[in-house]
Image (cartoon, grey):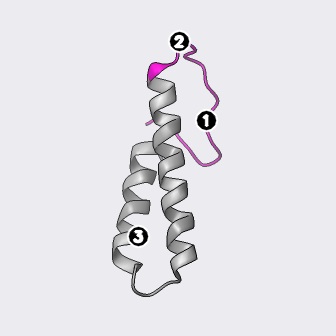
Amino acid sequence: MTLDEAILRQENMIDQNEGEIGREDIQAMKLGTEAMKRIKDYRQRSSVRMTPLLPGETEE
């Protein structure tokens, strides 16, 4: 799964379950989403092109 796919899935899970799971769980999911966005942004800006993939992440 790509970072874009993971971000989209996580955001959808938050939207669909916000009233059903605890506030701290939602905050943790949002933190994870923001972390993935920062990793994606860092990779796009970085001159290092061979950054290791995260566990479960694919290139495409």
The spot of residue 15 in percent (x, y) is 34, 72
Front tag of 1 and 2: 2
Marks 1,2: beta carbons within 8 A = no
Neighbour tally class for label 3: few under 14, some 14-19, many 20 plus, Cα within 10 Å: few
Quarter location, residue 19: bottom left
Q: How much space separates mark 2 and mark 3, taking CA atoms?
A: 33 Å
Q: Amino acid at mark 2?
A: Ser
Label 1 or label 2, whichever comes before in sequence order: 2
| Span highlighted in magenta in the image | 45-60
Q: How much space separates mark 1 and mark 2, taking CA atoms?
A: 16 Å
Magenta run includes residue 33: no
Residue underneath mark 3: 13
Q: Quadrant of the C terminus?
A: top left
Residue 24 as seen in the image, left or right of residue 18:
right
Q: Dot 3 lies on which element?
A: helix
The spot of residue 48 in percent (x, y) is 58, 14
